[in-house]
Amino acid sequence: MTTFGDYLSKKSIKKAEVSRKTGISTARLSELSHNESTNLKAEELYLVALAIGVKPSEILNNVCSHLKLKPTK
């Protein structure tokens, strides 16, 4: 499961409802939830945030918290 999938799962979000509200297919939401190589688009993140009633930054912080800057020389 991806970090996005974990986030939706922890929030008890139903993909069918998000799909209905956003127009993002359930297949795409499942792909984003289960396939690490699938990239979440900014537009998708924003629409999902609107659909579930959170700020886009909350999803972004959860999904990208593992990213770190490279050390400078």
Image (cartoon, rainbow, N blue to C red):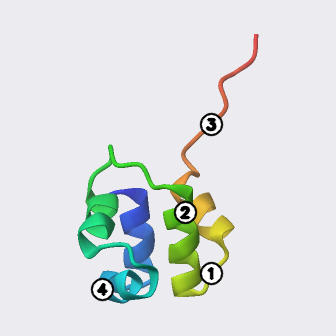
Name the amino acid, label 4. Ala
- Mark 3 or 4, which is nearer the eye? 4
The residue at the point 34 percent across, 86 percent down is: 14
Spatial CA span between label 3 and label 1: 24 Å
Residue sitting nearer the eye, 2 or 26: 26
- The percent coordinates of residue 47 (x first, y second) are 54, 74
Q: How many tags in the picture?
A: 4
On screen, residue 32 versus residue 45, left or right, reads left
| Amino acid at dot 1 | Val
Q: Secondary structure at mark 4?
A: helix
Cα distance in 3D space between marks 1 and 4: 18 Å
Question: Would you name the residue on which mark 3 appears?
Answer: 68
- How far apart are the two marked residues, 3 and 4, measured between alpha carbons? 33 Å
Q: Amino acid at mark 3?
A: Lys
Q: Secondary structure at mark 1?
A: loop
Quarter of the image where the C terminus is located: top right
Pick whichever of labels 1 and 4 is earlier in the sequence. Answer: 4
Query: In the rendered structure, which disc, 2 or 1, sits on the residue that comes first in sequence?
Result: 2
Checking the image for residue 16, the label placed there is 4
Residue corresponding to mark 2? 43
What is the residue that sits farthest to the left in this orientation?
27
Spatial CA distance of label 2 from label 1 is 15 Å
Spatial distance from mark 2 to mark 3, Cα to Cα?
23 Å
